[in-house]
Image (tube, helix red, strand yellow):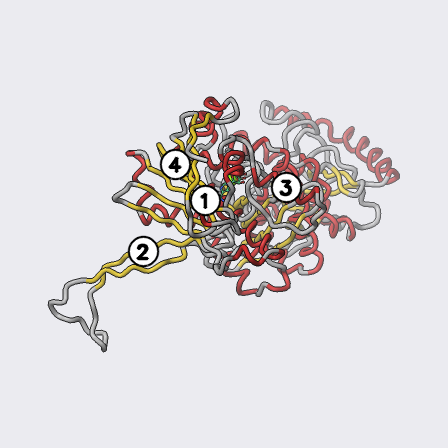
């Protein structure tokens, strides 16, 4: 068959425009798409070679090669994968939105082949990302195991038509040459190419190589410079990607050092991680996660524009490190990698946020992190404390924002209290367990620091009764007590509010009687004080809650508590 000109199969011009101009927000990813396709093609060849060794043709060194040619203005991506027949080229490349890779997986599933390679493509548009940077694309390919003369040459300017013709190709696999647009020549630059490969394709499991030329001053046998020798050019082939996607390996094969090294790599932290969480989720959503809890909080933990700590990959290919929906804000300290096998590669950030898969992943990640923390608290309390001292205030935000996980979170929050040393904490569970007989509520007092709160006259009655009072000194604690209104059937009550049930019924009756009598006796005095303080207080009452101090200020039952009032006053309300 000779050269033919064909129109693209689908109603494509518009679709093509869409892909080229709007699907991707970032041009660099054309290379990610082509490298991913090459990796898929090698996977297929390798898979096929298990049952048909002949397709190896003596070359089992799987490799993806990038060849920038400054003179020609072209960038070529070459692989020694499975290649394509003419029919496959027309179907897979000539039809936009037809994914040969997806069809391949479907075929295997229909034949009930259980084990199949983890392929990246499934959307059928990645290839067309080439036209973002190239005004002409030439693809030369030969199906592995076919005659050398069975090569196919395909070419298109991305304008609605393409040509196909037979050709001879000595090696199996595919070679795609991008004739770069004038303003896209930066993609010929060695460092530009390196950085894109490093960012998006670092963990692709085959080497992505490039010839690199350096000028050197020739050296003598002892390494000494030879005068007047000038310089020589030396070209070596370098592998640009690390291929070390440790999260894809079984836990049992990964050493502590490898986990640490990877943590430093993803987090840019010099310390060791406090905790490593590595697992594979199966079922509705399939992904692998390698997460870390850092040992120390970063300086920008509370700045809103900070980056998220988790990188999202799809089958080892980097998608983004700023995926909004991946973990909720109150877990923003978690670092690491999530690698999904059922998300499409070709998604924009905007689409990702709405993606149901992302929501499923998030749900799973949250459950895992919270259960890890619960286990740490139970089995490694020292480590949990170390974690809590750094990230407790952030975790507590969850009580307010994550209603679905409130029960779990209320087991994880800790507070200082009248029964802990400064800097030590009590959980609500511990509080509840050591409540004396007769105590009906859980008490807390809010303020800015512990030592000031310890002086509060409000605490006298609680000390006298042996009741513990939690010190809530974090700004976020106001939200926490709005979120946790009761624990184990006991209401959380502010120790400086008016509606406390500190006594049993009998004690109450007796006190009421005494108080009534005393009030009668001291009514004159109370009226006098109230008159003198008019405009400053609403009411003057005899109190039974003080043991040492002469008087104290209390908030109305439905009024604002003292701390809230202070905050509002500071805000000039
Ligand atoms: P996807 O990768 O999502 O399937 P693409 O547009 O990236 O979509 O590629 C379309 C199809 O073209 C692939 O599914 C595959 O069948 C074929 N293809 C693309 N690149 C290559 C290649 N380097 N070698 C062999 N086949 C390829
Ligand atoms: Mg693809």
The reply to whether dot 2 and dot 1 touch (C-beta < 8 Å) is: no
Please tell me whether mark 2 or mark 1 is closer to you in this view.
1
Please tell me whether mark 4 or mark 1 is closer to you in this view.
1
Q: Does the residue labelled 1 lie within 8 Å of ligand 1?
A: no
Image x and y of residue 361, in percent: 63, 41
Is tag 2's residue or tag 4's residue first in the polypeptide sequence?
4
| Residue toward you, 551 or 498 | 498
Please tell me whether mark 1 or mark 3 is closer to you in this view.
1
Mark 1, residue position: 151
Query: Badge 4: few (under 14), some or many (20 or more) residues near its Cα, within 10 Å?
Result: many
Query: Badge 3: few (under 14), some or many (20 or more) residues near its Cα, within 10 Å?
Result: many
Image x and y of residue 166, in percent: 44, 40
Is tag 3's residue or tag 4's residue first in the polypeptide sequence?
4
Q: Can you tell which quarter of the image residue 516 is in?
A: top right
Mark 2, residue position: 212
Mark 4, residue position: 137
Please tell me whether mark 3 or mark 4 is closer to you in this view.
4
Mark 3, residue position: 361
C-alpha gap between disc 2 and disc 3: 40 Å
Query: Badge 1: few (under 14), some or many (20 or more) residues near its Cα, within 10 Å?
Result: many
Is tag 2's residue or tag 3's residue first in the polypeptide sequence?
2
Image vertical order of residue 455 relative to residue 252, above or below = above
Is tag 2's residue or tag 1's residue first in the polypeptide sequence?
1
In the rendered image, the residue lying farthest to the front is 1
Image vertical order of residue 570 relative to residue 306, above or below = above
For the point 63% across and 33% down, the residue is 356
C-alpha gap between disc 4 and disc 1: 17 Å
Residue 212 appears in the rendering: yes
Please tell me whether mark 2 or mark 3 is closer to you in this view.
2
């Amino acid at each position: 068959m000779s050269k033919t000109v064909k129109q693209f199969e689908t109603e494509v011009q518009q679709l093509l425009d869409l892909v080229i101009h709007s699907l991707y927000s970032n041009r660099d990813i054309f290379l990610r798409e082509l490298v991913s396709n090459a990796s898929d093609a090698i996977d297929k060849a390798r898979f096929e070679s298990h049952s048909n060794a002949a397709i190896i043709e003596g070359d089992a060194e799987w490799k993806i090669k990038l060849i920038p040619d400054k003179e020609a203005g072209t960038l070529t991506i070459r692989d020694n994968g499975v290649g394509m027949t003419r029919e496959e080229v027309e179907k897979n490349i000539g039809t936009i939105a037809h994914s040969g890779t997806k069809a391949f997986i479907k075929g295997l599933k229909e034949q009930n082949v259980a084990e199949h390679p983890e392929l990246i493509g499934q959307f059928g548009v990645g290839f067309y990302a080439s036209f973002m940077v190239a005004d002409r694309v030439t693809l030369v390919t030969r199906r592995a195991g076919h005659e050398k003369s069975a090569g196919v040459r395909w070419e298109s300017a991305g304008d609605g038509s393409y040509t196909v013709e037979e050709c001879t190709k000595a090696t199996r696999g595919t070679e795609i040459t991008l004739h770069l647009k004038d303003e896209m020549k930066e993609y010929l630059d060695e460092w530009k190419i390196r950085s894109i490969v490093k960012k998006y394709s670092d963990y692709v499991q085959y080497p992505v190589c490039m010839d690199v030329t350096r000028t050197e001053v020739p050296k003598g046998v002892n390494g000494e410079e030879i005068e007047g020798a000038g310089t020589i050019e030396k070209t070596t082939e370098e592998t640009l990607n690390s291929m070390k996607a440790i999260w894809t390996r079984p836990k049992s094969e990964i050493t502590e050092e490898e986990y640490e090294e990877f943590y430093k790599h993803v987090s840019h932290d010099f310390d060791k991680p406090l905790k490593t969480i590595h697992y594979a989720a199966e079922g509705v959503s399939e992904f692998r996660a390698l997460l870390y809890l850092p040992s120390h909080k970063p300086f920008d933990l509370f700045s809103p524009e900070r980056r998220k700590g988790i990188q999202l990959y799809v089958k080892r290919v980097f998608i983004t490190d700023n995926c909004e929906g991946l973990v909720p804000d109150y877990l923003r300290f978690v670092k690491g990698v999530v690698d999904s096998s059922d998300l499409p590669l070709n998604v924009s950030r905007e689409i990702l946020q709405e993606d149901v898969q992302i929501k499923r992943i998030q749900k799973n990640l949250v459950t895992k992190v919270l259960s890890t923390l619960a286990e740490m608290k139970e089995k490694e309390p020292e480590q949990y404390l170390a974690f809590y001292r750094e990230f407790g205030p952030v975790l507590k935000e969850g009580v307010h924002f994550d209603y679905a996980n409130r029960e779990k979170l209320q087991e994880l929050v800790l507070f200082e209290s009248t029964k802990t040393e400064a800097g030590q904490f009590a959980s609500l569970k511990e509080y509840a367990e050591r409540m004396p007989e007769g105590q009906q509520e859980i008490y807390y007092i809010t303020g800015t620091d512990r030592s000031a709160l310890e002086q509060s006259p409000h605490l006298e009655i609680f000390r006298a009764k042996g009741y513990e009072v939690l010190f809530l000194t974090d700004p976020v604690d106001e939200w926490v007590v709005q979120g946790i209104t009761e624990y184990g059937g006991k209401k959380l009550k502010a120790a400086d509010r008016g509606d406390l049930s500190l006594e049993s019924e009998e004690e109450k009756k007796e006190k009421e009687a005494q108080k009534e009598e005393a009030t009668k006796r001291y009514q004159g005095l109370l009226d006098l004080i109230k008159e003198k303080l008019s405009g400053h207080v609403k009411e003057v009452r005899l109190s039974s809650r003080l043991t040492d101090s002469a008087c104290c200020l209390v908030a109305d039952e439905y009024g604002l508590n003292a701390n809230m009032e202070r905050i509002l006053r500071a805000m000039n309300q």
